[in-house]
Amino acid sequence: MPNRLDLPAGFRWGVSTAAYQIEGAVEEDGRGPSVWDVFAARPGVIRDGHTGAVACDHYHRYPEDIALMKGLGLDGYRFSIAWPRVQPTGAGPVNPAGLAFYDRLVDALLAAGITPLPTLFHWDLPQGLEAPSTSGSAAGGGWLNRDTAYRFAEYAAIVADRLDDRISTWITLNEPFVHMVYGYALGIHAPGRALMLDALPAAHHQLLGHGLAAAVLRERGLEVMIANNLTPVWPASSSDADLAAADAYDALHNRLFTDPLLLGRYPDLSAYGVGPDLGGCVHDGDLKLISATPLDGLGVNYYNPTRIAAPTDPGLPFAEAPIDGVPRTAFDWPVVPDGLRELLVGLRDRYGAALPPITITENGCSTTAAVDDQPRIDYLAGHLDALAEAVAQGVDVRGYYTWSLIDNLEWSEGFNQKFGLVCVDFETQRRTPRASYGWYRELIAAHRGRFAK
């Protein structure tokens, strides 16, 4: 059995973060409000009333955080760019101070020998694109509005023109499935809509935005990726009803966000009562545009499998079932390392030659440990062994970026879920490396040592 040290030479090691979760400084240097700023101001929507107003204060403390990255010996750092810091209302004038921050960040990363891997959208949509009546923007409705896809491409051009002399590979979107479901279908994330299946336009318009932005990036000679949250889907039994439910869930969670990119078509969503036009939001030529710029890499965010049973009510064609008999994270997510191997091999088998090289852009867990976080070490070790097994089975995986470098605002959970290799005291902003930080550093060094001359 291969282990985590059997990964190939040139394999890239990194960490991931996201702007709203770490930057803070939400009212500084011309940044406009995001949907998360507005959502977090609602009473009761985020645990303990936490917000990203300060978060990890990375906006001011990024040199310290880059020093921590350098101490790990990382190849790369995946971060996101805050759209409202660059374009305060999501359209129109550029905020020079916002772009200047990312200039400083990128230059400091390169000086530390770390390759920047930016994500253009990690859920912090400018509020001006969500609610024009309060911002003066010409559009509204967020990703429910087709116009947002075109505004996203304009924003991508602005950022790429500023940074493309130093950054060659770009991620367009992070986890469009999660953003659609939690933000638009269930309302537990910003912008807080609860539309259920009427949220499907947010899926299509995000993918349309990817296609438009991908063309912008490729025109500049840049490489293009997208980061999807993907999950192996397990039927609760071998009954026809459970198998059909699992297939319906797989179509929604996985294939809805990969088939258009890699195959140029949407999967069968008839179980949801919609046809290939997703209820009319798909226009002629959209799918060709979404798939026209081939991906240079697919980012895979993996945390756990999903077990699915036949529906218990008529609202959806599936019901989620528990996965028993496995460890749980502090977030109560099941720990199934081999699910990562299963997922990667399944992608290879499903898409064949259409599948680009894969990078694991997120994988990690929340623990309750202050510093001695052995459960996180066990989690990472198990998943990296599963990754090595997938590579041994012929899957082309180029890198692994763990979530996350530092504890951060875990969206609606506030500061209560600790995903960081580095512990953050949110009152003092003191950073304390955990045991997993040292473990990851030693793993990276040991892997490189195998190929040293």
Image (cartoon, rainbow, N blue to C red):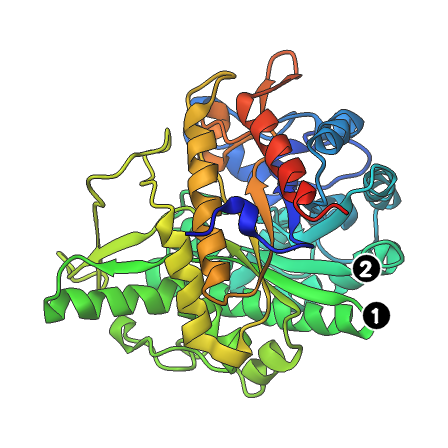
SS at mark 1 in the image? loop
Question: Closer to the camera, 75 or 308?
Answer: 75
What is the number of the mark on residue 277?
none
Query: Does residue 130 appear left or right of residue 60 in this picture?
Result: left
- Cα distance in 3D space between marks 2 and 1: 8 Å
* CB within 8 Å, label 2 to label 1: yes
Quick check: can you spot residue 218?
yes
At which x and y percent is residue 285?
Answer: 58, 87
Instruction: Using residue 308 as the reference point, say whether residue 419 is left or right of it.
Output: right
- Judging depth in this view, the residue of 199 and 418 nearest the camera is 418
Q: Which residue lies furthest to the top in this view?
A: 428
* Residue beneath the point at 52% across and 17% down: 371
Furthest toward the front, the residue is: 453
Q: Where is residue 195 in the image (x, y as percent from the top left)?
A: 37, 57
- Please state which of residues 192 and 327 is positioned toward the viewer in this rendering: 327
Residue type highlighted by circle 2: Ala
Q: Is residue 369 rendered to the left or right of residue 335?
A: right
Q: Residue 220 carries which label?
A: 1
Q: Is mark 2 on a helix, strand or loop?
A: helix
Label 1 CA crowd tier, 10 Å (few <14, some 14–19, many 20+):
some
Question: How far across and how far down the image is residue 150, in percent?
Answer: 68, 69
**Total marks placed:** 2
Return the residue at label 2. Answer: 160
**Any part of residue 89 in sight:** no
Residue visible at 88% across and 45% down in the picture: 96
Q: Vertically, is 306 above or below 63? A: below
Q: Which amino acid does label 1 sit on?
A: Arg
Name the residue rendered at 47%, 38% in the picture.
380
Q: Residue lying furthest left in this view?
A: 239
Residue 258 x, y percent position in the rendering: 48, 70
